[in-house]
Amino acid sequence: MERWWVPGKLFSRGNMLKKYEFYIALIVLGLCLVIGSINPAFFTLPNFFDILRSSVVMMIFAMGVLMVLVSGGIDISFTAIAAFCMYVTAQFLNNIGYEGSIALAFLLSAILGLFLGLINAVLISTFRLPTLIVTLGTANMFRGFLLAFIGTRIVVRLPPGMIDFARWQIFQTTTERGGTVGLSFSVILLLIVVPLVWWLLNYTMLGRGIFAIGGDRVAAERAGLNIKVIQFFIYCFVGTLAGVAGIVHSSLIRNANPFDLVGLELSVIAAVVLGGARISGGHGTIIGTILGVFLVVITNNSLILMGIPSYWQTVAVGAIIVIGTGITALQGKRERRVGIMIDKKLGT
């Protein structure tokens, strides 16, 4: 993983121009300027707060997906895990008449997510099954079990702690029209999850192992890395993050809908790939992932502001997947070609 925070190199022009993330940042900036020129409401404080609030759930998902893609795998079951966890947790807390804080909801949902992620981990690491097939199967299994045995009705009455969480704001301000707008407290979770994943990927042996098995699994095994333990951690961690994201989503929309979050996995994967993570594994950055998420969220937000029908969002996300995957594949091909040329010059 490239480290942007190396002293003396962070804002080096030559260094930045070589970064894929620099061009994504330019695209995000250009998109903001275009949208703002069409609809000035885009640059208002309420819209800025709304974009941040809309990014929270997708960003938490994206941090887990980044780890999976870097390891050379793919996970499409995380939204099914999130829906399962938020619905079961809300139902359980209602049934026992719980009226405490949201902490218990986070804890229960995270543990449930950890357990469901463990199912993926066992199937992938122990039986060495393809990650796409396993997560596709478990996603359908989790959704089917939820709808068949737990419930299909939307839970409209959430525990008071979850409702309070949706109301909490870091600060409030008054607009020119006399209304009040505030920054959602849920943004605080990004200040916990993002640095945690950044630290895991950059400053731990586990992070190096994740990059190693994504770059070359055989070489990683020969180097003595325990592939099973690393994959166990990745899929359990993704399940836990999905459980947390499920509670955030449920609290912000103030209900628990078992049909929610379907299809969001494509947008999340698109955002992470667009941020520079390669489907083939071995490469991906936190900064790129953050920019990719903002690009997808701003794209969706801008279509609404410009009055474009919502189904065009699907077209836009699909185009982002194709373009992002194509760019990262070409970049990887170019780097391999450069590596071969260097090897030839060195005579190795």
Image (spheres, rainbow, N blue to C red):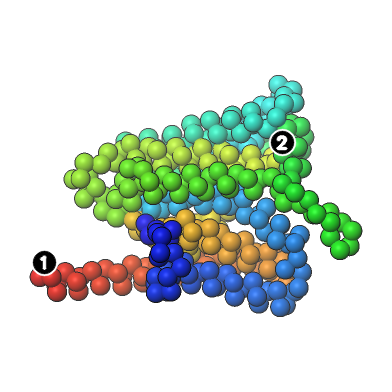
Disc 2 marks a residue whose amino acid type is: Met
Above-or-below relation of 88 to 171: above
CA neighbours of label 1 inside 10 A, class few (<14), some (14 to 19), many (20+): few
Closer mark to the observer between disc 2 and disc 1: 1
- Asked whether, in this view, residue 261 is left or right of residue 72, the answer is right
Name the residue at 74% across, 46% down.
169
Name the residue at 62% across, 67% down.
299
Q: Which dot marks residue 348?
A: 1
Which quadrant would residue 221 be assigned to in this image?
top left
Q: How many labels, in total?
A: 2
Q: Circle 2 is placed at which residue position?
A: 162
Disc 1 marks a residue whose amino acid type is: Thr
Nearer to the camera, 180 or 262: 180
Above-or-below relation of 52 to 115: below
Is disc 1 placed on a helix, strand or loop? loop
Is disc 2 placed on a helix, strand or loop? helix
- Asked whether, in this view, residue 149 is left or right of residue 170, the answer is left
Where is residue 211 shown, x and y percent of the image? Answer: 33, 51
